[in-house]
Amino acid sequence: YVRYEPLLVKECGIEVTAMHAGRSSQDMHATFQRAMLRDLAVRFARSFNAARRALFKLALENRDTIAPCYTNGVAAQPNSLGHTWLGHLCGLSRDFEIFKGAWSRLNLCPMGTTVLNGTSWPLNRRSMAAYLGFDAPIDNAYDAGQIAGTDVAIESALMLVSPLMHIVQFIQDVMVQYAQPHPWILVSATYASSAMPQKRNPGSLIDVRRDANGVLGSLQSIILRAHNLTPGMYDVKDIELNGELLRDAGTVAAEFARVLGLLKVDAKRALAELNLDWTASQELADILMRRFGIPFRLGHHVASQMVTVARAGNLTPLTFPYAEICRIYKEVTADEPEDVAPAAFPLSEAEFREALDPREIVAHRATEGGPQPKELDRLFSEMGAAIAADEAWIEDKAAKLAEAERRLETDFEALAARA
């Protein structure tokens, strides 16, 4: 109004100021800021769902790849790589639930509340909200312009925290094994070191991580801009700064989806990595207890001694002598009665080798949500359906916004034609 209304008065006369009736820059600014954030949120959601779809495709392609999983930065147990990446997708699915909750509060309309407590003009706020594509008006007029405007700006930033952190977490999980001389996941697009001929740097992964962390750093500023403000101050409502966060987060998600398409998995190398270490050793203790009733701590001691001897002798699960596990078992259980532990190691050599086979371990998991084939079928089916439902959800929201805009333009043109 400050800049535009004088131009209208000059062109049309003072009567044109009738358009100001029932309006204020307070509710107008609050409304267009939400509308702009809403458009950027749709763009982000589409990019984010594209990343989920790309990771789902990659997980499905690698459901039969057996690879090490890491806890506390150390190789822990074998797992289906598809199952591991479905776990990452579960985090991303929760992120979209956060987004949908934020959308339900973002897509409410402040228009018609004027400065802070409404107006004596009998405005139809529900009609205003519908024309502008909002689900409903913000109920309390004071809240609409003085409280909710700050809240929605902050929430639009905070809803980006978990998605970006999950993207960085996935990248770091890949990077753990990338430091090896012979990694089992590679990025097909790398750049060579300027000095070291052998070096191929995963720059595309690093760039996404850098940019995701850049947005995470920048969004802290919105909290500081909102700090120590009285209601209604505009410090935190800057649409350029707030919109930039959503734009940049959408770009990160889109780049993450692209980089996922560059990942190449060497399933044979992943299995070889498992067979170089002792991530399958817990299964031996579990089998001794489950099949023969040997107390777990006793079986754990047998398996632990096996690993100690193996590492001292540079032995692997494929080269560890069967006679040696029989000796270790007899030594560890020497003082135990027969009803606690059989005198001789109770597994045949073939059974012992199977107990240490990462593929057998994964295939014979029995708990709900595990990587065994039947459960993987269910988990993949449910995750695919969830991603499809969320893709349809955001497209439905976008279609409703487009239809509201079309209706507004059509009805305004009809009204202008009668003037």
Image (tube, helix red, strand yellow):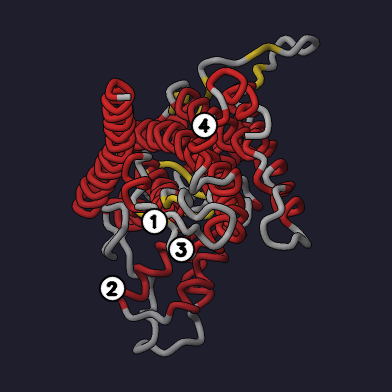
Please report whichever mark, 1 or 4, sits nearer to the chain's N-terminal start: 4
Residue 389 coordinates in the image, percent (x, y): 25, 44
The first of marks 2 and 1 along the sequence is 1
Measuring 67% from the left and 34% from the top, which residue is drawn there?
2
Q: Which of marks 4 and 2 is nearer the N terminus?
A: 4
Q: Position of residue 130 (x, y in %)?
A: 32, 45
SS label for mark 3? helix
Q: Are marks 3 and 4 in contact (CB under 8 Å)?
A: no
- Residue 316 seen by the camera: no
Question: How far, Cα to Cα, is label 1 from label 3?
Answer: 73 Å
Q: Distance between the residues labelled 1 and 4?
A: 20 Å
Horizontally, residue 36 falls left or right of residue 387, namely right
Q: Position of residue 275 (x, y in %)?
A: 47, 42
Q: Which of pointers 3 and 4 indicates the residue nearer the eye?
A: 4
Question: From the viewer's perspective, is the residue at label 4 or at label 2 nearer?
Answer: 4
Tell me the crowding category of disc 1: few under 14, some 14 to 19, or many 20 or more residues within 10 angstroms, Cα based. Answer: few
Q: Position of residue 20 (x, y in %)?
A: 53, 40
Q: How crowded is mark 2: few (under 14 residues within 10 Å), some or many (20 or more)?
A: few
Q: Is residue 72 left or right of residue 223?
A: left
Provide the residue designation for mark 2.
291
State the residue position of label 1. Answer: 122
Determine contact: label 4, label 2, CB under 8 Å.
no
Label 3, on which residue?
282
